[in-house]
Image (cartoon, rainbow, N blue to C red):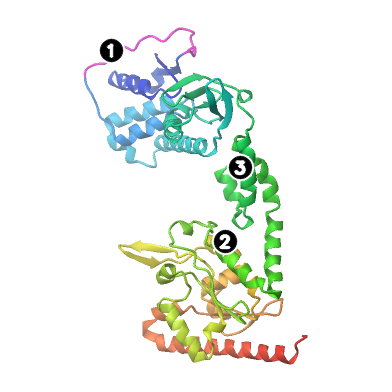
């Protein structure tokens, strides 16, 4: 039995030296007991030095070194043995690292990913609090990592907060930075860390003021910021009440928008909604698209046309229906006798989803999650405008308006009566006409006929409203 004592739980250099020597003497994993210096071994005896390794060397892929240096920070006590077992395999078969189905490799990769997540959580959720000391202000933070990541994360905090003196306290280890040198200390307790400071009260007030119910996605928030980290963050004391009141605030925003219809505040309400949409992060499309493309048109429009999403030109211009499909749409509206300037046009999804091919950005269909995430904005537009007729241009728009997948051919050409008395129509998207080269004229004529029916229905409803103003 070979007993190896490592200097610390994250002693990668010590593990690497010992593992190399053990592989060269052909030691089997079950013949090696790994322990951290200070821990007693199973027999109560100090570890004996390893026998001298024979001359020789062997190489391993760089990917293994990266994996091992991260996975060794995991809290699983078997990590040293598992890494050694993989190292023995790699000596004889360096391509073992390419076998993603190998159970041992998958387990170690899972450990490494867990360590990286824990490092990210420490960077994201650690909070410094100011304390007065003999040498001036010092900033102290408390954190409880899942794994042995404190030393591995030290460089990040030194670089990020190089100009201030700070201490990070954890149960197993403490780090101290004086502006020039980093030192280590023993573990601490949470009671040794300050509870709050004056800056926190200012931050909590600011956080509460910017909390936006339109951006609340509780599931995603809890996935990224699990409750176990809340105790480290001052703003999380507010989250429970803010989330609980989010739906109420959302209803208040909708009610405010609806009430604004009675006066000159309608335009200001729409402007506020549009400005808020420009900062939308409800789905990941905002990360790649150029901008949010909001709807446009009169706020008293009788007809609202809802398309799928902005295209390349709409994304660049920041306006809906200005590209080739939009130009075809304008021509069809004119032939059908509908004045576009009297209609409101928008999209079910407000950001351009695309696949990049060289310098070109090729349209990619939004998925159900993206449609659902953006439905909130469309509902606010429709609540504010309250059109007599809403037209879904294509299946994506229909799915958003009906909140379920819809077949265009099954609903096309007939008004769908809604519970509040308004009409919903479904037809093709103008871009469809650009794709059917062999029967474009026929499909275009059908599209224009759909628009004529919609226009006639809008005119009849307008005449009925004029004849019965109180109805």
Badge 1, how many Cα within 10 Å: few under 14, some, many 20+?
A: few
Magenta span: 38-55
Q: Nearer the viewer, mark 1 or mark 3?
A: 3
**Identity of the residue drawn at 35% across and 10% down:** 49
**Identity of the residue drawn at 32% across and 27% down:** 88
**Which residue is label 1 attached to?**
52
Q: Secondary structure at mark 3?
A: helix
**Which residue is label 2 attached to?**
276
**Magenta region includes residue 262:** no
Query: Which image quadrant is residue 426 in?
Result: bottom right
Q: Is residue 194 visible?
A: yes
Query: Which image quadrant is residue 232 in?
Result: top right
x, y percent for residue 433 = 43, 81
Q: Is residue 212 above or below residue 9?
A: below
Q: Quadrant of the N terminus?
A: top left
Q: State how far apart marks 2 and 3 are (Cα).
A: 22 Å
Q: State how far apart marks 1 and 3 are (Cα).
A: 59 Å
Q: State how far apart marks 1 and 2 are (Cα).
A: 69 Å
x, y percent for residue 64 = 34, 33
Circles 1 and 3: CB distance less than 8 Å? no
């Amino acid at each position: 039995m070979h007993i190896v004592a490592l200097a610390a739980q994250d002693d990668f250099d010590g593990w690497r030296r010992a593992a190399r020597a053990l592989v060269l003497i052909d030691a089997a994993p079950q013949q090696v007991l790994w322990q951290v210096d200070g821990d007693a071994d199973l027999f109560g005896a100090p570890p004996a030095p390893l026998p001298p390794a024979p001359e020789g060397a062997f190489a391993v892929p760089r990917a293994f070194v990266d994996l091992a240096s991260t996975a060794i920070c995991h809290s699983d006590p078997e990590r040293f043995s598992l890494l050694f077992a993989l190292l023995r395999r790699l000596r004889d078969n360096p391509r073992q690292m390419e076998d993603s189905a190998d159970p041992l490799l998958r387990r170690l990769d899972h450990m490494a990913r867990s360590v990286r997540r824990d490092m990210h959580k420490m960077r994201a959720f650690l909070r410094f609090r100011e304390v007065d000391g003999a040498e001036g202000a010092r900033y102290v933070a408390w954190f409880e990592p899942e794994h042995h990541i404190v030393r591995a994360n030290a460089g990040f905090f030194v670089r990020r907060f190089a100009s201030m003196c700070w201490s990070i306290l954890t149960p197993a280890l403490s780090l101290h930075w004086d502006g020039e040198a980093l030192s280590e200390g023993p573990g601490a307790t949470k009671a040794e860390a300050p509870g709050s400071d004056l800056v926190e009260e200012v931050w909590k007030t600011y956080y509460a003021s910017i909390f936006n119910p339109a951006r609340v996605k509780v599931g995603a928030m809890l996935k990224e910021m699990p409750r176990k980290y809340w105790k480290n963050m001052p703003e999380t004391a507010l989250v429970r009440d803010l989330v609980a009141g989010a739906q109420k605030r959302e209803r208040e925003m909708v009610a405010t928008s609806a009430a604004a219809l009675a006066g000159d505040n309608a335009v200001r309400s729409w402007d506020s909604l549009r400005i808020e949409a420009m900062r939308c992060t409800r789905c990941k499309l905002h990360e790649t698209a150029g901008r949010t493309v909001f709807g446009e048109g009169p706020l008293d429009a009788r007809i609202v046309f809802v398309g799928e999403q902005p295209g390349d030109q709409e994304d660049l211009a920041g306006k809906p229906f200005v590209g080739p499909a939009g130009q075809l749409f304008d021509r069809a509206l004119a032939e059908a006798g509908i004045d576009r300037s009297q209609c409101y046009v928008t999209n079910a999804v407000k950001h351009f989803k695309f696949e990049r091919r060289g310098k070109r950005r090729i349209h990619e269909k939004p998925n159900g999650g993206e449609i659902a995430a953006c439905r909130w904005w469309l509902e606010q537009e429709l609540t504010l405008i309250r059109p007599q007729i809403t037209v879904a241009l294509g299946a994506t728009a229909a799915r958003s308006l009906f909140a379920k997948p819809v077949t265009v051919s099954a609903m096309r050409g007939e008004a769908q009566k809604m519970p509040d008395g308004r009409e919903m129509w479904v037809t093709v998207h103008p871009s469809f006409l650009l794709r059917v080269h062999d029967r474009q004229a026929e499909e275009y004529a059908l599209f224009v006929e759909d628009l004529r029916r919609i226009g006639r229905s809008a005119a009849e409803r307008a005449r009925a409203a004029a004849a019965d103003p109180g109805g």
